[in-house]
Amino acid sequence: DWRWGLFGHEHDDRMQRAKQLLDELEPYLEQGFEYRDLPNNLRQQIQTELSEFFASAMSWPSFKQLSRLLLSKEWILRQLLSVKNWGAYMHCLRAYIDQGYDFRQAIENCETPIDILVGMKSDMYPATGQLRMADLNERCSVLPFTKSGHTPLIDQPFKLTRELHRFATA
């Protein structure tokens, strides 16, 4: 009943694609295959999913394009991400599918003050849902990052640094 989860309106389609990929990879995961020994079509699907995942984290169109371009090339992917642990990426993806990651009840029941950093341009976690999370608990404060997607460290590093410093010294 929550429309603003991971990938917003694209959630169902992207999770279905991910599930299909994981189902195809399951025998290779179980047998401990090295990334290089996977069939080419499965390696290409992994690269596509990873490039789309990282592109979703970016807010600037040029960074989205760069992410898609770089991570879709296997030789670049090997330089940027450890393909030795490709199974770990797949286990994380499986966790997104199987676990749900619904933190609404935890936020409702939390007695500690909560700062919610919201990338207002996030494709990965739509800002509308993040802002609604703050309605669940009166101890929530919203810190909007108006020029950021899911990665304020890239989009607004100075503001993020100031907010982390404020948090650490509080």
Image (cartoon, grey):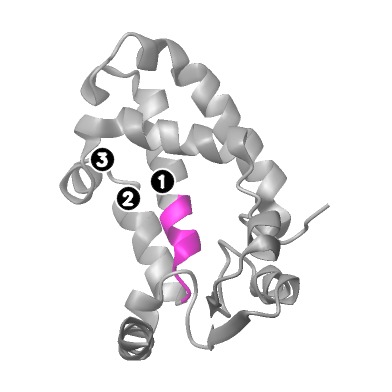
User: Residue at (34%, 33%) from the top-left corner?
Assistant: 88
Q: Are marks 1 and 2 in contact (CB under 8 Å)?
A: yes
Above-or-below relation of 117 to 80: below
> Horizontal and vertical percent for residue 22?
50, 25
> Horizontal and vertical percent for residue 44?
39, 33
How many discs appear? Answer: 3
Q: Would you say residue 17 is visible in this rendering?
A: no
Q: Earlier in the sequence, mark 3 or mark 1?
A: 1
User: Residue 140 is drawn in which quadrant?
Assistant: bottom right
Residue type at numbered disc 1: Leu
Q: Residues within 10 Å of mark 2 (few under 14, many from 20)?
A: many
Residues in magenta, as a range:
52-59
> Farthest residue in the left direction?
79
61 lies left or right of 73: right
Q: Main secondary structure of the magenta part?
A: helix
Q: Please, what secondary structure does the residue beneath circle 1 have? A: helix
**Residue annotated with mark 3:** 74
**Residue annotated with mark 2:** 71
Q: Would you say residue 41 is visible in this rendering?
A: yes
Q: Earlier in the sequence, mark 1 or mark 2?
A: 1
1 lies left or right of 41: right
Q: Please, what secondary structure does the residue beneath circle 2 have? A: helix
